[in-house]
Image (cartoon, grey):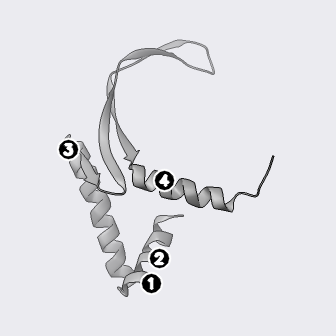
């Protein structure tokens, strides 16, 4: 599902125009990005939380040449799914799977 698909789905459900819905979706994404850049966490109950994780510096290997490469310490965005969402998705996916032994 692309961002355009999400906008279409929300627009149909809310009755807002696609332009208005896209502005809301873009605003949400920008808010998450800005909060993570500032080191803040975002928690949406029943959905999950956005956080940043610190990755230690390490020595990696270039797969093409085999040469060692130093990777500096860095931060990565991380999304942790809530228990409620995990259960809902798991239950829905189990119902879709055919019975097998």
- Looking at the rendered structure, the secondary structure element under dot 3 is loop
57, above or below 54, in the image: above
- Report the residue marked by disc 1: 12
Q: Label 1 neighbourhood size at 10 Å, few (<14), some (14-19), many (20+)?
A: few
- Report the residue marked by disc 2: 9
Which is nearer the eye, 35 or 88?
88
Q: Quadrant of residue 80?
A: top left
Is tag 1's residue or tag 3's residue first in the polypeptide sequence? Answer: 1
Question: Spatial distance from mark 2 to mark 3, Cα to Cα?
Answer: 29 Å
- Looking at the rendered structure, the secondary structure element under dot 1 is helix
1, above or below 94, in the image: below
Is tag 3's residue or tag 4's residue first in the polypeptide sequence? Answer: 3
Q: Quadrant of residue 75?
A: top left
- Report the residue marked by disc 4: 87
Q: Residue, x 28% and y 58% (percent of image)?
A: 30
Question: Spatial distance from mark 4 to mark 2, Cα to Cα?
Answer: 23 Å
- Asked whether the residues under the numbered discs 2 and 1 touch, taking CB atoms below 8 Å apart as contact, a structural biologist would say yes
Report x, y in % for residue 37.
Answer: 23, 43
Horizontal relation, residue 62 to residue 52: left or right:
right
Which of labels 3 and 4 is toward the front?
4
- Looking at the rendered structure, the secondary structure element under dot 4 is helix
Report x, y in % for residue 17.
Answer: 37, 85
Q: Residue, x 51% and y 64% (percent of image)?
A: 2
Horizontal relation, residue 88 to residue 17: left or right:
right
Q: Label 3 neighbourhood size at 10 Å, few (<14), some (14-19), many (20+)?
A: some
Is tag 4's residue or tag 1's residue first in the polypeptide sequence? Answer: 1
Which is nearer the eye, 92 or 42?
92
Question: Spatial distance from mark 2 to mark 1, Cα to Cα?
Answer: 5 Å
Q: Residue, x 32% and y 59% (percent of image)?
A: 29
45, above or below 24, in the image: above
């Amino acid at each position: 599902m692309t961002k355009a698909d999400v906008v279409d789905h929300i627009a149909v459900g809310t009755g807002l125009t696609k332009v208005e819905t896209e502005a809301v979706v873009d605003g949400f994404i920008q808010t998450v990005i800005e909060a993570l850049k500032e080191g803040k966490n975002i928690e949406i109950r029943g959905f999950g939380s956005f956080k940043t994780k610190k990755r230690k510096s390490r020595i990696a290997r270039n797969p093409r040449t085999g040469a060692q490469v130093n990777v500096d310490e860095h931060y990565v965005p991380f999304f942790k799914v809530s228990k409620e969402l995990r259960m809902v998705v798991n239950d829905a996916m189990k119902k879709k799977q055919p019975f097998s032994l």
